[in-house]
Amino acid sequence: MKKAGILALLLILVISSCKNTKPETTVTESSRWSFDTLHIEKKIYMDNDSTKSALTLTLEFDYPSKFDNDTILKAVQEHFVSYFTEDEDGTYRGLDPVAGFNAFVDNNVAESIKLGKAAEGSEIDFSEYYKTVKTTVTDTTAVTITGRTEVTQYSGGAHDSHYVDYFTVDLRNGKLLELDELLNGDDASKQLLVLIKEVLNTTKNANGDPLSLFDPTTITPSPNFYFAKQGIVFVYNTYEIAPHSDGLIEVTIPYAKIKALVAGPYQELIAQKTKTE
């Protein structure tokens, strides 16, 4: 495909498919928060020929668009962009949500075109290929906001790739809440691991069978976690501690058990989550 053709395809995709829609967050807007969504769903055809098979690209980005502190809002948005784009090398650093989304669209379209060219002339059915990335706002408290990015992709092979990343931002400083900051020291981490393994030992997979853990001795508390009504949930994606057949594994540690392990600055968060109406 000539460069002009690629640029034309990119232009068509951005103009016809990028749009603002109602956010599909699980959080309601308030006087403190407003949210917005950017969305694209597009068939990417081999050689830009609609008579040929096409990969389906779906990107949806829910993000906070208003907060009562502009400085913190900017920091929060940067974290949302980073997790939506899986930005490990800083490619999207400093971009606002719209610019980050558009750049991510461009890069994914280019990657899809390259994948289609590689598949051309083979036995591969390009129409079976797809990539879906979705980031949503899942929770807000007086001191935190939590997001969730889910990626599902198939580009050949026996299985698709599916994983979920949760991230929480401390609204008091605009920084990501890391596990080592949440816990009250190394001893707390060791005690948490004991609790996690107790749950894993009794957890069943979707078929009702015990988990086929790779090596229980190598398991550590997952840095991928979120705050639910019942407790803190630690997420292990496919292949992290068990085979594909066991799927995504979530371990919930009740607040009553984990409260003593949480560092002082986040006891307020635990108190909010356990407050009775």
Image (tube, grey):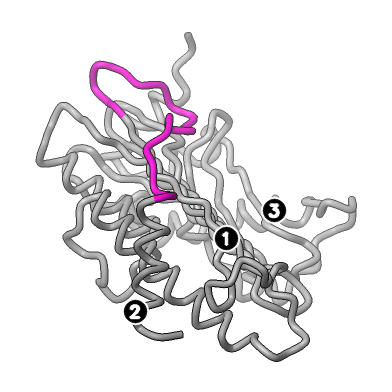
Closer to the chain start, of discs 1 and 3, is 1
Q: Label 1 to label 3, Cα distance in Å?
A: 45 Å
Q: Say which of marks 3 and 2 sits in front.
A: 2
Give the CA distance from mark 1 to mark 2.
19 Å
Look at the numbered disc 2 and give the secondary structure of its residue: helix
Please provide the residue range marked out in magenta.
16-34
Inspect the image, locate mark 1, and give the three-letter code of the amino acid beneath it: Lys
Q: Amino acid at mark 3?
A: Glu
Looking at the picture, which amino acid does disc 2 mark?
Answer: Ala
Residue at the extreme top of the image, as rendered: 277
Residue 37's image quarter? top left
**x, y percentage for residue 228?**
53, 34
Q: Which mark identifies residue 43?
A: 1
Marks 3 and 2, the one that precedes in the sequence: 2
Q: Nearer the viewer, mark 1 or mark 2?
A: 2
- On whether residue 24 falls in the magenta region, the answer is yes
User: In the rendered image, which residue does mark 3 sit on?
Assistant: 198
